Amino acid sequence: MDPVLEIRNLSCSFGPKPVFQGVDLCLKPMDSYALWGPGGAGKSTLLKVVAGLIPGSGGTVRIQSVEVFSASQKTRQDLRTRLGLVFQEGALISNMSIYDNIALPLRYHTRAAEAEVEERVGGLMAFLGIDREADRALPALVPAGVRKLAAIARALILEPVLLLLDEPTAGLEESAGRRVVRALKEYQEKSRAALLFATLDPALAVSLANRLGVLGKTGIRIEGPPREILERVAKEKGGP
């Protein structure tokens, strides 16, 4: 089974200050990997490097065998249709309605007719339990939980092979968090996508991930089954 994501000896620095070094990771279809680590460990930065939003300072990232850093602009554009990215704060476009935010990737990357856009957006909103009364509301006018669910819907709309999620249930009520976990699992079953997500929520890591890795300055220092790794971290002085 060919990998969806291969990271080899990846490093990232902001000026002279290294964020992380020596990260190695391989995800195959249906893998769900939780990145764990204290604030400042570089979890969010790693997701952005993988997505090609910020450059790494060394190493390689391959998505379905395409090397992200050296790919042409056209190839990177194609890669973006295979990725779903959810930022910690949602990062919806502020002057665009909830509906139009979710529909944006379809309208930008495909030639789907508006009838198909309506069907797919409506289906995802129903799937995630987003009230259709929010269709025409701007992000600032809806609760934080609705914004997060809309960001997840936007990430799923192109049916990506790789989902990158930064704290996907942060800010959600418990019931909404359960809907997100259920939706991501059902999406994986349907699409065989791989998930890479950053979290400091033990319950999310255990319920969604089949592997958990603890990210440090010198790479992923330990990884394994989530419960086992979380127990080890809890015993370590200064663990997250």
Image: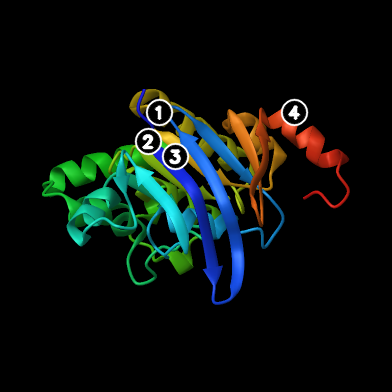
**Image disc number at residue 29:** 1
Q: x, y (%) of residue 177? A: 58, 41
Q: Amino acid at mark 1?
A: Pro
Q: Amino acid at mark 3?
A: Leu
Structure colour scheme? rainbow
Look at the image and tell me in which quarter the N terminus lies.
top left
Q: x, y (%) of residue 85? A: 41, 51
N-terminal of the pair, mark 3 or mark 1, is 1
Residue placed under numbered mark 4 in the picture = 228
**Image disc number at residue 186:** none
Residue at the image position 19 percent from the left and 57 percent from the top: 108
N-terminal of the pair, mark 4 or mark 1, is 1
Q: Amino acid at mark 2?
A: Val
Instruction: Please indicate, yes or no, whether residue 168 appears anywhere in the rendered image.
Output: no
Residue at the image position 73 percent from the left and 29 percent from the top: 227
Check disc 1 and report its element: helix, strand or loop. loop
Check disc 4 and report its element: helix, strand or loop. helix
**C-alpha separation, residue under disc 2 versus residue under disc 3:** 25 Å
